[in-house]
Image: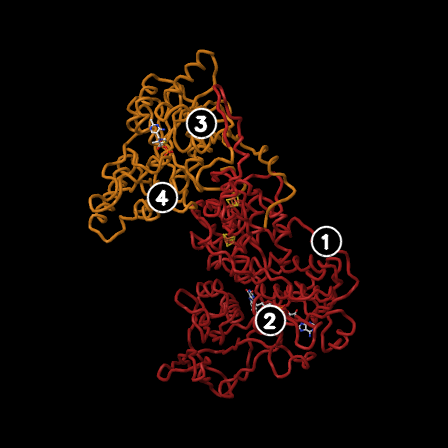
Amino acid sequence: MSQDKDIPLAELRRAQPRFSGFEAGHRACLGCGEALAARLVTESAGPDVVYANATGCLEVFTTAWPESAWRVPWMHSLFANAAAIGAGMEAALKAQGRSTRVIAMGGDGGTFDIGFQALSGMLERGHNVLYVCYDNEAYMNTGIQRSSSTPHAAVTTTSPAGRERMGKRHLKKDIVSIVAAHHIPYAATASVAYPADLRKKVRRALAIDGPTFLHVHTPCPLGWGHDSALTIEIARLAVQTGLFPVIELERGGVAGVMPIREQRPVSDYLRLQNRFRHLFADDVRAREELEHLQALADHNIERYGLRPGHEADPLDTEGADTVKRGGVR
Amino acid sequence: MSVKITRGSFARPGTSLQFDTGSWRIQRPQHRHATAPCHAACPAGEDAQAWLALVEQERFRDAWETLIAANPLPAITGRVCHHPCEAACNRGNYDEPIAIHHVERLIGDMALEEDWPLPPSQTNGDPREVAVVGAGPAGCSAAWHLARSGYRVQLFEALPEAGGLLRSAIPPYRLPAAVVERELHRLLARPGIRFLPGQRLGRDFDLDELQASFAAVFLSIGTQRGRDWSIDGATPSDLHVGLPLLKEWMDVGAIPTWNSVAIVGAGNTAIDLARVLKLSGVPEVHIISHKAIPGPGVAPDDAMPAIRREIEQALEEGVVIHEHRGVQRLILRGEQVIGVELVHMKKLPDAEGRLQRVAFEGTESILHVEQVIPAIGQVVEPEGVQSLLGQRSFFRVDDRGCFPDHPRLFTGGDARGDRGTVSEAIGDGRRAALAIDRLLRQQAGDPPSPAQQPIPAEQLNLNYFETAPRPRVPVLDVARRASFAEIEGPLDTRQALGEGERCLSCGNCMACDNCWTLCPDVAVLKTREVASDGSHYLFDYGYCKGCGLCARECPTGYIVMQPDL
Ligand SMILES: Cc1cc2nc3c(=O)[nH]c(=O)nc-3n(C[C@H](O)[C@H](O)[C@H](O)COP(=O)(O)OP(=O)(O)OC[C@H]3O[C@@H](n4cnc5c(N)ncnc54)[C@H](O)[C@@H]3O)c2cc1C
Ligand SMILES: Cc1ncc(C[n+]2csc(CCOP(=O)(O)OP(=O)(O)O)c2C)c(N)n1
Ligand code: SF4
Ligand code: SF4
């Protein structure tokens, strides 16, 4: 037993040397990637920010009435309209001459699908809002239905594997390219496996005047079917395989990437998740789909130039998560 | 619960803290210090992980104090130890092991240069006196640990000076006399230790007297008698024996320079003598070894027992090693040796499964040499200890070094027979001192042993480390080697700091913040003060749901999940 009886925890919690915008006691599942990402985003954004949150897991698990896990001004209205609410808040703050920043956020369903037109409008009108999409690759809050972000061949309750199909038939929507095509100053992807990179991108986006977008890959132990302890491992493998490229786009052009020092085969990533279990059956279709996913990963690597240079890059997939003794990560 | 939500209702910030998500948990994370492999492997009992962590923080003096809590002679062991810590080091599974012995040497030398005093005893003085006989590494270590525990120590030594084989046999090209001198002087001058040179057990006093006048006795007399050697009853008329010859050279600095020599043996004496002869200008130096040159694919029990680095350097210097070979016959002209007949040999199990040397007929060869020198090892000199030795060559004792039927009498180091290195001797001195302390304080049971199962590399999370090369020290070119110039140079301070940083901190928190950063439930809290388990983090079990993420991602394997139902 290693608990110190003499350090009062509640007091200690108040004295943490970081900004706490997102508190304990929320109802997210064990090992929830979205909860972790939201904590990291609020932590990096600091106190002078207001939030608009779309309907979805994050909204639900943080606000069991009359409680709230938020310590920042936070508002929820509908599934489809976080970007519109964010845009309205920004306009109101601007009218009052205030410098408070706005973050709008939602899940992949709320961003790629139902909230997409509100998002596009917000970007097109040039609102000074950071939009964060927590991508757990399905409608998790209502029971794991497929979204346009669900990867090809993944099983959800509405894209089962069976005689007809090997999971989802369609491809994952390339949201960051679509967003960047609005010619906005900054759009980036990030992963909970690389918190330092994620934090840097939140700060970067908030420092920019104009609409910015951050797409965060957040594993979901329940929906993806993996052990709650594996959230970071799986998120890391998504990046190391090339399935989730970590990139930055400015005005639509590639401005930065996280190179992959040692590319891992996609099967290392897929094997850990029940939503891809059917791909390891003795079935010609399964073998073909595995190859298909590998080709998609290779295509990402080629497209964004994720292969490492000759020198090991301290900010590549192996270097970006290096820890140090006594070092704030 | 029914709560009415009216227009304009809002929730207060952070009120989710009222909800106890800890009740969901079926397993809990806990901090657990595990023994690092380097620590478990160190015969002297050093916890390299602990002192490397201090080196990383540029706290060299604290590192030295942590180190000498186990081993008071780091400048010496940093030079001569065979460093099994590095063979065990988890970093070896990643890129290259930490250069532990180089860093050990550097901080040992720093302490000498900056004249850091040995820290005082941890406890109040104890009036009881303990006798230590023999001031080699085993005896010096025992004296240091007994003095640290507050006892008064009388350290008897037959020779005029302390050090044992460190001073008399290990050549200065790898252990400069000044280092031995300074490190021992610091130890012998420590309050609580009374050094009595020129006092030989069996000549100037006997065992009964010792046992009558001291609360406990530690015998660290090493092995002073050469094993008998002959080939079918024949020995050369002018027989020179390895260790005495080497000691003579250490004393007077000269050695006969024959044209060609064959040394029979496979240990450190054989190697050092061969190197000394070579460096003194003997053109042809051969070593006849029953065992193999250590290397990949050579079973440990088939490898020459000499330190591998020394074997490698001897080969570089032109010493010829005949592996798996034995001397079958001396070729004499009159009484004078002119050569030896060699034969291939190997140890094979006999009908009872015991290993026996077998010579293979048809593999004989002739080697012409002027001298054949046995260097086949030493045994305990029975004079003064005959009653303890009986018919055996070495003392037989339990793990703590205690003699059966003599609860206050201990031994360690080479005199045990199952030892043979400086660091084992130092470890024996420490273990016996701990056992004596427990005995005199009437505590039951064995002293706690640090050698628990070391944490394997699989329990670390190596994703969080970066590859980095192991530093190299300057080594004298073969052409520039001479018997009195130290061959290996030191690490510089910057390289040592780098090794501190490269250390994976196996099994011990390095305050990297990873758990604090990655907990989705904000259930890891950081403390400014060090928590009682030595880390800087507390789990808030009121909220921890037991997902196991922190344990999985902890780089150092310091968090384990325990059932919690
Ligand atoms: C040539 C050579 C090279 C070596 N190189 C290495 C190396 O590189 N690394 C390594 O780890 N090990 C090495 N060793 C082995 C190492 O030196 C020994 O294992 C170690 O010194 C044993 O320590 P000890 O204290 O048990 O005995 P010793 O070092 O032999 O010390 C025993 C002491 O007791 C004294 N003594 C003996 N009898 C009496 C008595 N009756 N009364 C009073 N005092 C007495 C002796 O004078 C001596 O000072 C080497 C050995 C040799 C011979
Ligand atoms: C218009 C509308 N349709 C359906 C719903 C039901 N609904 C609530 S949350 C949700 C899914 C949210 O999925 P996503 O945006 O991916 O977020 P996640 O829960 O996965 O974090 C749905 C379908 C709703 N609230 N509003
Ligand atoms: S990495 Fe450090 S702690 Fe681990 S075995 Fe090597 S020296 Fe010891
Ligand atoms: S994750 Fe880092 S800070 Fe946390 S226990 Fe492990 S070593 Fe210590």
User: Which marked residue is nearer to the observer: mark 4 or mark 1?
Assistant: 4
Q: Drawn colour of chain B? A: red
User: Which marked residue is nearer to the observer: mark 3 or mark 1?
Assistant: 3
Q: Are there few (<14), some (14-19), or many (20+) residues within 10 Å of tag 2?
A: many
Q: Is residue B193 rendered to the left or right of residue B553?
A: right
Residues tagged 3 and 4 counted as in contact (Cβ below 8 A): no
Q: CA distance from mark 1 to mark 2?
A: 29 Å
Q: Is residue B257 rendered to the left or right of residue B411?
A: left
Do dots 3 and 1 share one subunit?
no
User: Which marked residue is nearer to the observer: mark 2 or mark 3?
Assistant: 3
Q: Is residue A63 rendered to the left or right of residue A87?
A: right
Identify the amino acid type marked 3: Arg
User: Looking at the rendering, which quadrant does residue A252 occupy?
Assistant: top left
Q: Chain of mark 2?
A: B
Report if the beta carbon of the residue with label 2 is closer than 8 angstroms to ligand 1.
yes
Identify the amino acid type marked 4: Leu
Q: Drawn colour of chain A? A: orange
Q: Look at mark 1 in the image and give the residue it sits on.
A: B120
Q: Look at mark 3 in the image and give the residue it sits on.
A: A203
Residue A70 is situated, as x and y percent measured from the top left of the image, at 49, 29
User: Looking at the rendering, which quadrant does residue B154 occupy?
Assistant: bottom right
Identify the mark at residue A237; answer none if there is no mark. Answer: 4
Identify the amino acid type marked 1: Pro
Q: Chain of mark 4?
A: A
Q: CA distance from mark 4 to mark 1?
A: 53 Å
Q: Look at mark 2 in the image and give the residue it sits on.
A: B414
